[in-house]
Amino acid sequence: MLTGMEKKALGVLFVVVIILIIFYLCFGVLYPNAGVVQYTPDTPEKTRVTYEGIILESKITSTGGHVLLDVSGVTVFVEGGADNIFYKTGDRIRVTGIVETYAGSREISVGTTGSISLIE
């Protein structure tokens, strides 16, 4: 049998769980893509975006082992991705990353190759 204190603690725990479930469901409705938006040339810096396109060119940077992808005219910077990139020119991919400006040019910066997926 539960004591009075245990019953109160169980009641508080139940209320907290219900509040968290409601918050989770509302967050899914308000932010269905967890705040990720479709990339456009007007997307502000530091915005988390997703973008789909065909790899037109792939090159490794001269320092750091990073990869620059030209994905349908949009530059995608893959930090430290030289050893992990297995996509090739002509592949259709989806990337998720952060919009940044480097040397005056806009790019989507991808922290890991896990943010890149092949579309068949």
Image (tube, helix red, strand yellow):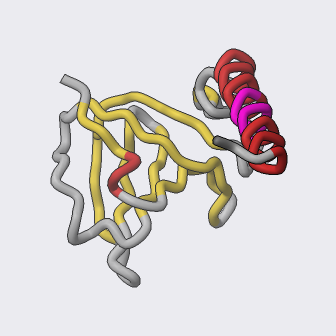
Query: Residue 37 at what x, y percent from top left?
Result: 63, 28
Residue at image coords 52%, 34%: 50
Residue furthest front as drawn: 1
Dividing the image into 4 quarters, which one contains the N terminus? top right
Residue at image coords 64%, 66%: 103
Q: Which residues are magenta?
A: 13-18
Query: Residue 74 at what x, y percent from top left?
Result: 48, 40
Query: Residue 9 at what x, y percent from top left?
Result: 78, 46
Query: Which of the pair 60/51 is nearer the observer?
Result: 51
Query: Residue 16 at what x, y percent from top left?
Result: 77, 37
Residue at image coords 47%, 61%: 111
* Image vertical order of residue 91 relative to residue 86, above or below: above
Q: Is residue 15 magenta?
A: yes
Number of numbered markers: 0
Q: Is residue 55 magenta?
A: no
* Image vertical order of residue 100 relative to residue 74, above or below: below
Q: What secondary structure do most residues of the magenta stretch adopt?
A: helix
Dividing the image into 4 quarters, which one contains the C terminus? top left
89 on left or right of 52: left
22 on left or right of 116: right
